[in-house]
Amino acid sequence: MAHYAFINENNVVTEVIVGRDETEGDWETYYANIRNQQCVRTSYNNKIRKQFAGIGFTYDPVADVFIAPQPFPSWTLDAQHDWQPPTPRPDGLGWYWSEENQQWEQA
């Protein structure tokens, strides 16, 4: 059993399905041809393409990774394709990002 993400013309994931294992054939191409849409395998255990794809994720074909949606407008994407806040999260539990105040606040 494997999972496959369908990608639209903007490289955004529109659907993720359970499909056949790639050891049994080229299922990315098979599913892409059926749907007439790009299809890319994704992995629950994050062994391929950085992380498991979800609806709304972006596929970067150059880096061959899935990128999660941007959590807040002020956050930026780092070289490892992870979103980073303007300031690091403080140690400990109960912190959340306040986009309005542009800082970490405690719950």
Image (cartoon, rainbow, N blue to C red):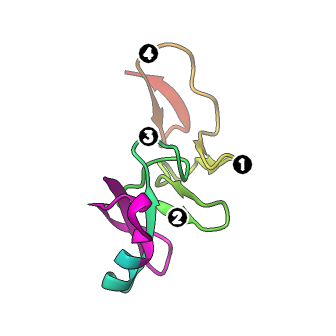
- Image coordinates for residue 6, horizontal then vertical, percent: 38, 70
- Of mark 4 and mark 3, the one earlier in the sequence is 3
Query: 24 or 53, which lies in front?
Result: 24
User: In the rendering, which numbered label is found on residue 79?
Assistant: 1
- Image coordinates for residue 9, horizontal then vertical, percent: 47, 81
- Image coordinates for residue 107, horizontal then vertical, percent: 37, 21
Q: In this view of the protein, can residue 56 be seen by the observer? A: no
Q: Amino acid at mark 2?
A: Tyr
Disc 3: which residue: 45
Give the residue at the far left of this rendering.
Answer: 18
Please, is residue 3 above or below residue 45 in the view?
below
Mark 4 or 2: in front is: 2
Mark 1 or 2: in front is: 2
Secondary element under disc 3, as helix, strand or loop, is loop
What stretch of residues is rendered in magenta? 1-29
Q: Amino acid at mark 3?
A: Asn
